[in-house]
Image (cartoon, rainbow, N blue to C red):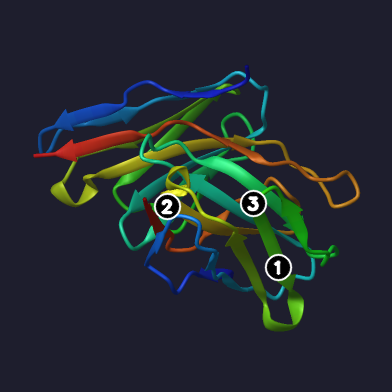
Amino acid sequence: AQKVTQVQTEISVVEKEDVTLDCVYETRDTTYYLFWYKQPPSGELVFLIRRNSFDEQNEISGRYSWNFQKSTSSFNFTITASQVVDSAVYFCALSVGTSGSRLTFGEGTQLTVNP
Amino acid sequence: DVKVTQSSRYLVKRTGEKVFLECVQDMDHENMFWYRQDPGLGLRLIYFSYDVKMKEKGDIPEGYSVSREKKERFSLILESASTNQTSMYLCASSVPGTYLLGGYGYTFGSGTRLTVV
């Protein structure tokens, strides 16, 4: 069985602070995919990134960066110089085997960026 | 613009009613999913389908059923709505893939917020 844990339920920061959202996953499969999604107040899930288990390179996209470490089963997400528009619920998720199969989600982290 | 459309954004139903939540995708995706979202619990999988007329139970199928008569439509049915089914329901679709083929992501609908009174 798969499991995703996001230990931070809520995070509150002041604009321009850096913030890291933690994600730890469990699976016995050797082929799997990890995802991060953003859910703004409008409710729709917005895809941010997908990583497969064979690619441990970290990735940076603008103010967003992701650190994938198989040794600790973690896939952490950092927002640099946070902005008010980053306020949302962020979900980490895992699918195993063939991509496109069922997603297992973490509990979500509510990020609030205050002006 | 490809999308997953959920027929209702907000629904209020009475206890004991039979409730249908509809989801339609226009991307010819094989896989479709119904999730339920509750605070502190994340998204939990109710049912999913890998093809027309196929259905598989997810983690919390009790009290729900599904129907997939056409590839583009996946319906979630609450046979007899109860107050503990008050929640946000999210539909998603995807195309299966492999690592070598790059895999594929998921497209989510905007959600249906169901209140059972």
Report crowding for label 2: few under 14, some 14 to 19, many 20 or more residues within 10 A (C-alpha). many
The mark closer to the camera, 2 or 3, is 3
* Whole-percent x, y for residue B83 in the image: 14, 47
Disc 2: host chain: A
* Whole-percent x, y for residue A79 in the image: 58, 58
* Residue pointed to by mark 1: A67
Residue visible at 40% across and 60% down in the picture = A14
Could you tell me the amino acid type at mark 3? Arg
Q: How many marks?
A: 3
Distance between the Cα atoms at labels 3 and 1?
13 Å
Pointers 3 and 1 in contact (C-beta within 8 Å):
no
Distance between the Cα atoms at labels 2 and 3?
17 Å
For the N terminus of chain B, the quadrant is: top right
Quarter where residue A104 is shown: bottom right
* Residue pointed to by mark 2: A89
* Residue pointed to by mark 3: A63
